[in-house]
Image (cartoon, coloured by chain):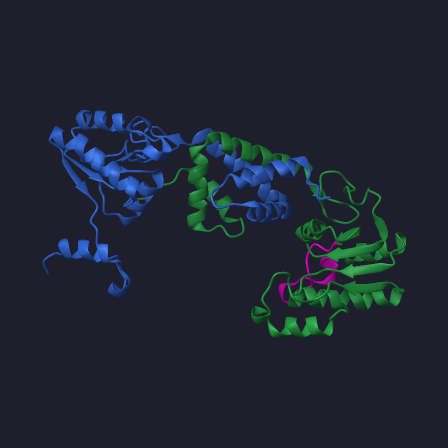
Chain colours: A green, B blue
Amino acid sequence: MLQFSNSLTRLLGELKKLPGVGEKSALRLAFHLLKSPGNIEALAESLKQVAAKVGFCSVCFAITEEDPCWICSGDRDGSTLCVVEEPQDLLALERSRAFKGRYHVLQGTLSPLNGVTPADLRIAELLERLTAEGVKEVLIATNFTVEGEATALYLTKLIKPLNIRVTRLAHGIPIGSDLEYVDAATVQRAVEGRSEL
Amino acid sequence: MLQFSNSLTRLLGELKKLPGVGEKSALRLAFHLLKSPGNIEALAESLKQVAAKVGFCSVCFAITEEDPCWICSGDRDGSTLCVVEEPQDLLALERSRAFKGRYHVLQGTLSPLNGVTPADLRIAELLERLTAEGVKEVLIATNFTVEGEATALYLTKLIKPLNIRVTRLAHGIPIGSDLEYVDAATVQRAVEGRSEL
């Protein structure tokens, strides 16, 4: 009969809660960790540190160690606010170095089927910021999924009546792609949004 | 400029040491964990427990919480010893329920190119056990890779002169496979090892 020690079984259970980790990968990770006890300690320690120190910014709800986060406490342009779904979307935009304003993280998307309603997102906080910070443009950068688009539409309907400009990331051909392999809907949007040379 | 907090950077570094985890997956895991602080604490705690409690069996070098492990301290047949590379190989054999004897984990394979010599494996301990425990058969269950085969050959040359039977796992067609898709070398071994019906 196969028998695992209690602490190993518990670790496997915890590892399996991670995204993309199933029975086999949990075992693989556990055995890898067991081969280097120093690494286990270091991983455990850094997890505890993160749990203790890292939280959400009380202004924009991004992940941060200091509250407010370095963007909210910095001197970035406050007239443009970029709305994203998750903290990792903020990172993707920061990597592009194209956006110079501030952010607001919704911490999810509207998804009635999964029971996610406007009250579950940071929408009330967003509306408060719009007036308090004198925002002139809201760039909605939710994902281009059904839920992301629905959330963008919902926000547009809320924000437009406040006489604030609402914009959305452009659709188009990704850099470096072959036209041949780009889906028809994307090509259509790229034609509609064509620019003068 | 992109800026991570110190503790988050450290956690990402630790996560990237795991097998199959690169920059992107480390970020994905970290953000997943940050969404459920309870899970971070539980994972950290169970890692510490494992680091503190789980070690190697002093007899067979499998992973265990009690020393000697439950197989070595149990009443399994001591006349047959199965030699495997890693603790997870022992698990694979135990799952098959086909082997009723005891195990010996080498904790690696011979690999001169990577600087792994016989002295780095638990081979001296294996030879000691053979005499001390009156072993009659050694089933070599190293993997069927170049290193695994080389290790099997090396062990055979060491053990045969001791008048101990040395056996190897059978080659053949895996259960449920189409002959069409099985490689020629495997089919060849399956023909050579054919059995009477």
Q: Is B190 on the left or on the right of B50, as rendered?
A: left
Instruction: Please identify the quarter of the rendering in which residue A181 is found.
Output: bottom right
Query: Residue at 51% across / 36% down in the picture?
Result: B47
Is B132 on the left-hand or right-hand side of A131? Answer: left
Q: Which of the two residues, B90 or B187, is positioned nearer the viewer here?
A: B187
Could one spot residue B142 in this view of the protein? no
The residue that appears at 42% across and 39% down in the rendered structure is: A31
**What residue lies at 22% left-to-right and 54% top-to-bottom?**
B185
Q: What is the x, y in percent for residue B21?
A: 51, 45
Query: Magenta stretch containing residue B93, yes or no?
Result: no
Left or right of A87, for residue B97 = left
- The C terminus of chain A lies in quadrant: bottom right
Find residue B70 and report its image quarter. top left
Give the image location of residue A44, x and y in percent: 55, 34
What range of the chain is rendered magenta? A105-121
> Does B152 appear above or below B184?
above
Question: Is any atom of residue A21 visible in this view?
Answer: yes
